[in-house]
Image (cartoon, rainbow, N blue to C red):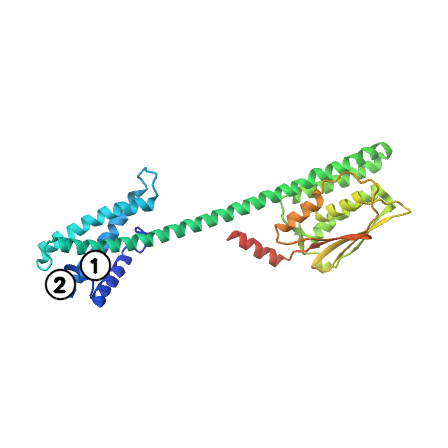
Amino acid sequence: MFNGPYKFLFPGLLAVYSFINIKVLDGDRLYQADLPLDKLFYIIFILCYAVWFVNAFIEKYNTNIKIKIQPLLLQFGFSIIGVFFISLSSIIITEAALGEPFSYSFQNLLLTSGFAFRINLFLNCINAILYFSKRYKEKAVEAEKLHSLNVEAQLVSLNSQINPHFFFNNLSTLSSLIHEDPKLADEYLQKLSTIYRHILSTRDKELIPLKEELAFLDNYISLLSIRFQKSLKFSKNISSECKDLLLPPSVLQLLVENVVKHNYFTEKEPLTVTITSDCEQIKIHNKKQKKDVVEYSSGIGLQNISERYSFLDKKIVIIDEKEYFQISLPLIHEDSNSRRRATYAE
């Protein structure tokens, strides 16, 4: 504070205030005598600036002191010593320059010291308030940066869970096709590589447009069609007006994969997965045809989706009824996503 941009203005304003305060209250006269106003003002003015610049000198060199003591305590401790010498010097100088009633006496020293120490205490209190206010803001900024980095790290971690989960699920199918139908296996491999390139290109993205996610889902459905032929069907009803809205990448693929994992389906008993949207949310609905024996599931798919939406301050809605299963995912509008990013940036 003492070496800041107002180092010449603030002590002057403080001197004016102190002068007016002494004259109005008429209870704290220096030198216990009626003093000429001009001389009184000069003394107060010089004392305020002297106290200020002693503190400025201490503050400037305080950082060079290699002692593990709070810098504010060092500042105040050294300033007390400095202010005492200012008070003593003031009495000696005023006696030589002005004479009576400014002559040196113990009483005048006490009065001058009392005034100077009050000014010093006031300035150091203001300095402490500014110091802790600055530190608080710095800590708040650091905490926000740490929070943002933590969210980003968790998001990357969650996105990375998709890749092995998706990739290794399809290797066994590809292995079977290589022996049964090499041509179909090649087609399967091409589609699989296209899908995996999409996953790699979106793994660092928080959100992607719905139309991009639907294109990715179409490729994944093509893989499923190769594997399950007519036993698995899809019905999509999504308005073109919704396709520029946003959602986390690969969430629809994870939900469809979840349906395949937990339900049986044959050509005689096909399973239909319905995907609809009202531009506020997108719903994935399927009739329950639960497998008698379900392969081990870690639950990472739904948990992954839920946690990624929690980073967006959104929640997914899961309806698990006896006859059907449905999940609703909020669609993110560009303006709300921009506001959220601006909040983190601040």
In-image side of 160 versus 253 (left or right): left
User: Which element carries disc 1, helix, strand or loop?
Assistant: helix
| Among the two numbered marks 2 and 1 on one chain, the one whose residue lies closer to the N terminus | 2
289 horizontally vs 329: left or right: right
Of the residues shown, which amino acid type is indicated by label 2?
Answer: Ala
Q: Position of residue 185 (x, y in %)?
A: 82, 36
The residue indicated by pointer 2 is 33
Q: Which residue is nearer to you in this view: 184 or 259?
A: 259
Q: Could you tell whether 101 is left or right of 292 in the image?
A: left
Q: Quadrant of residue 303?
A: top right
Res 191 visible:
yes
| Cα–Cα span, label 2 and label 1 | 18 Å
Residue 313 in the image, given as x and y percentages of width and height: 61, 53
- Say whether residue 59 is visible: no
Q: Which residue is mark 1?
A: 45
Question: Which residue is nearer to you in this view: 67 or 238?
Answer: 67
Q: Nearer the viewer, mark 2 or mark 1?
A: 2
Task: Provide residue 254's location: percent of width, then percent of height.
Answer: 73, 45
Q: Quadrant of residue 119?
A: bottom left
